[in-house]
């Protein structure tokens, strides 16, 4: 097959990103997740000549892995692919397994397929639920990474192992560079703590020592494990910041999970949250999911020419920052143009003071909810608004560390990689955070949540 090459300014041949994947097969974990779906769709849509995408899926809650694969494909983000390139879906090959189990609990015949055919491993599977038990977070995030790496080392012609981490893997620092930081804890220390204390909240807070939660600590441990145990594998770590709905392709505004900024902005726009921790200048480091996935695809295509790990931060705070306050106001402005609200939304109040946050919560949230419930009772209807307050308040408190801390997440490596792309690849794989127009994106963000997350449940 002809490879379309141009000359770079240094006179070296330039390989298109899509051409790199021609005739190659990749292995994806976490494919049923929000980011995983977009990654698979972008690979199939833009890398037309990719050979196969092996996707690890486990059975769950009475659904076989085959059912979960079908569920994965039955979401709107694949509609464009189905309409324009329907045969591309045949390139998805199900690998039934479980990252939490030794050898991924996959059949020997499937393991051999991966060993013989895969060129790139994209390991994105993880639990991102901050309230998950410490033990389960380690089981999924850390042990899962260990098991995927064990398999990857067996692959005959592996060119790149790409681990998807998070910019907040080192959230105990205000300035986060594109480097592997020293190990915060030994694995023995972590498992000894879990055995002795379980999920005791006070003991856990002391143990994680400056990290916002056990999730971020687990990702730091994973990065160190990958660094120390990669062997001869060419390894890349990509760290996204807060991943938000699609900006451009394949479906602007699409999102399918309530996480972090998505839930927070939606709660503000629905009148459920009227005060958060922080101040008007705290930066909300967001990055659209398609930008992250495009960057991942580009990074793997460019590979790692060195024997050291390359770390890329896929983020916006260092190149195109927006504050939580500004993001919430833009989102709310769009929301107010649509629909009716039982609890009238208003611009969010921000404060670093727990006393002030609690006082404003009582005045602006609890009291109106109580009065709305009283009115429902007078009409002979069941109260609901005080109950509705519980989840938004819990979420606000869980995200307190992030909404009240301005991180400066550096991205020099990422920008240098983006600069290597020619005009065509930049158009096909947009991933430069400097091109995000927040005043346009946040209204799109809002419309996407209303269309894909709120309306189906009404």
Image: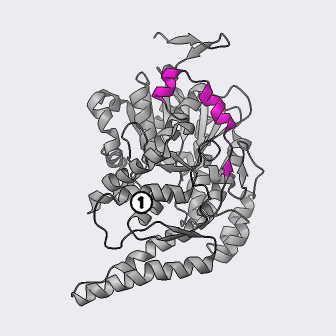
Picture coordinates of residue 58, whole percent (x, y): 43, 50
Q: What's the coloring here?
A: one colour
Residue 375 visible in this rendered orientation of the protein: yes
Residue that badge 1 annotates: 332
Residue 395, compared with residue 63, is above or below; it is below
Residue 397, compared with residue 30, is above or below; it is below
Q: Nearer the viewer, residue 27 or 294?
A: 294
Q: Residues within 10 Å of mark 1 (few under 14, many from 20)?
A: many
Residue 263, compared with residue 232, is above or below; it is below
The extreme left residue here reads 380
Picture coordinates of residue 341, whole percent (x, y): 31, 69
Residue 196 visible in this rendered orientation of the protein: no
- Say whether residue 135 is left or right of residue 55: right
Q: Which residue shows up at 48% across the image and 59% down it?
A: 328
- Say whether residue 244 is left or right of residue 386: right
* Quarter that holds the N terminus: top left
Q: Nearer the viewer, residue 304 or 354?
A: 354
- The kind of secondary structure the magenta stretch mainly shows is helix
Find residue 160 and report its image quarter: top right
The extreme bottom residue here reads 378
- Which element type, helix, strand or loop, lies under badge 1? helix
Give the magenta range: 408-429
Picture coordinates of residue 232, whole percent (x, y): 70, 31
Q: Nearer the viewer, residue 105 or 159?
A: 159
* Quarter that holds the C terminus: bottom left
Q: Which residue shows up at 75% across the image and 57% down it?
A: 184
- Say whether residue 127 is left or right of residue 194: left
444 is within the stretch colored magenta = no
412 is within the stretch colored magenta = yes
Picture coordinates of residue 81, whole percent (x, y): 32, 33
Q: Which residue shows up at 61% across the image and 81% down it?
A: 355
Number of marks:
1
């Amino acid at each position: 097959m002809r490879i379309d090459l141009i000359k770079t300014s240094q006179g070296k041949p330039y390989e298109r990103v899509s051409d790199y994947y021609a005739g190659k097969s990749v292995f994806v974990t976490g494919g049923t997740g929000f980011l995983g779906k977009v990654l698979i769709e972008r690979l199939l849509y833009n890398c037309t000549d990719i050979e196969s995408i092996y996707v690890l899926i486990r059975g769950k809650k009475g659904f076989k892995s085959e059912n979960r694969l079908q569920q994965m494909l039955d979401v709107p983000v694949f509609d464009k692919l189905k309409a324009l390139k329907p045969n591309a879906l045949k390139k998805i090959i199900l690998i039934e397994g479980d990252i939490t189990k030794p050898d991924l609990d996959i059949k020997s015949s499937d393991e051999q397929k991966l060993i013989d055919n895969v060129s790139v491993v994209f390991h994105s599977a993880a639990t991102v639920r901050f309230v998950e038990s410490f033990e389960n977070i380690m089981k999924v995030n850390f042990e899962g990474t260990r098991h995927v790496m064990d398999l990857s080392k067996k692959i005959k012609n592996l060119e790149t192992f790409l681990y998807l981490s998070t910019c907040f893997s080192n959230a105990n620092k205000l300035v986060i560079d594109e480097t592997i930081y020293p190990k915060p804890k030994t694995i023995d220390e972590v498992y000894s703590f879990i055995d002795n204390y379980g999920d005791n909240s006070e003991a856990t807070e002391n143990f994680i020592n400056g990290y916002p939660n056990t999730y971020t600590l687990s990702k730091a441990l994973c990065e160190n494990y990958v660094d120390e145990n990669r062997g001869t594998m060419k390894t890349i770590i990509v760290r996204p910041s807060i991943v938000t709905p699609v900006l451009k392709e394949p479906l602007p505004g699409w999102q399918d999970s309530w996480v972090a900024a998505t839930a927070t902005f939606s709660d503000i726009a629905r009148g459920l949250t009227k005060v958060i921790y922080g101040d008007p200048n705290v930066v909300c480091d967001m990055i659209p999911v398609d930008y992250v996935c495009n960057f991942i695809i580009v990074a793997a295509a460019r590979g790692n020419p060195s024997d050291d790990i390359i770390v890329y931060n896929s983020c916006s705070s260092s190149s195109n920052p927006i504050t939580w306050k500004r993001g919430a106001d833009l989102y709310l402005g769009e929301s107010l143009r649509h629909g009716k609200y039982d609890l009238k939304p208003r611009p969010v109040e921000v404060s670093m003071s727990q006393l002030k946050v609690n006082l404003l919560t009582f005045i602006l949230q609890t009291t109106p909810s109580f009065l709305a419930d009283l009115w429902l009772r007078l009409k002979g209807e069941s109260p609901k608004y005080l109950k509705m307050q519980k989840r938004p308040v819990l979420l606000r408190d869980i995200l307190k560390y992030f909404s009240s801390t301005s991180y400066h997440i550096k991205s020099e490596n990422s920008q240098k990689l983006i600069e290597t792309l020619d005009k065509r690849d930049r158009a096909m794989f947009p991933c430069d955070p400097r091109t995000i127009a927040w005043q346009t994106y946040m209204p799109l963000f809002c419309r996407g949540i209303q269309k894909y997350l709120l309306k189906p449940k009404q």
